[in-house]
Image (tube, helix red, strand yellow):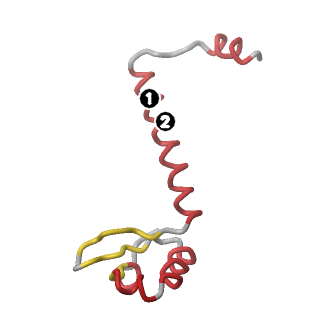
Amino acid sequence: MKTKFSEDIIPLSDLKVNPGKVVNHAKDTHRPVLVTSRGRGVAVVQGLDDYESTQEELEFVKAVAQGLIEIKEGEVTDIIDVKKQLGL
């Protein structure tokens, strides 16, 4: 999902004129569109599927990081105890 600066950065006025075109571009290319105002980024338009996927990946990475922290701090449970808790 690499940004193409010639296609993926648009002024706010373009979004106002044709919002459907901008949304479809983000959805079809699977790349976020940066919306600018006076030369500065103000918003990002992203397809819903891509947004949801990004959120799921972020939650997964956070969970892995939390697990690694717990292991480092010695907060571990024996596999036998885990199986008992799960009724396996």
Q: Tell me the crowding category of disc 1: few under 14, some 14 to 19, or many 20 or more residues within 10 angstroms, Cα based.
A: few
Label 1: state its secondary structure. helix
Residue 36 vs 43, above or below: the answer is below
Residue at 63% across / 16% down in the picture? 79
Residue at 59% across / 12% down in the picture? 78
Task: Evaluate if marks 1 and 2 touch, with contact meaning CB atoms under 8 Å apart.
Answer: yes
Please state which amino acid type lies under the numbered disc 1. Leu
Q: Position of residue 24 (x, y in %)?
A: 55, 80
Q: Which residue is mark 1?
A: 68
**Residue 37, quarter of picture:** bottom left
Label 2: state its secondary structure. helix
Q: Is residue 78 left or right of residue 35?
A: right
Q: Which residue is mark 2?
A: 64
Q: Is residue 87 left or right of residue 7?
A: right
Residue at 29% across / 71% down in the picture? 41
Q: Residue furthest front?
A: 16
Residue 63 vs 38, above or below: the answer is above
Q: Tell me the crowding category of disc 2: few under 14, some 14 to 19, or many 20 or more residues within 10 angstroms, Cα based.
A: few
Q: Position of residue 29 (x, y in %)?
A: 53, 77
Please state which amino acid type lies under the numbered disc 2. Val
Q: Position of residue 40 (x, y in %)?
A: 24, 73
**Distance from Cα at disc 1 to Cα at disc 2:** 6 Å
Residue 78 vs 21, above or below: the answer is above
**Residue 45, quarter of picture:** bottom left
**Residue 16, quarter of picture:** bottom left
Residue 38 vs 1, above or below: the answer is below
Closest to the observer, 36 or 85 = 36
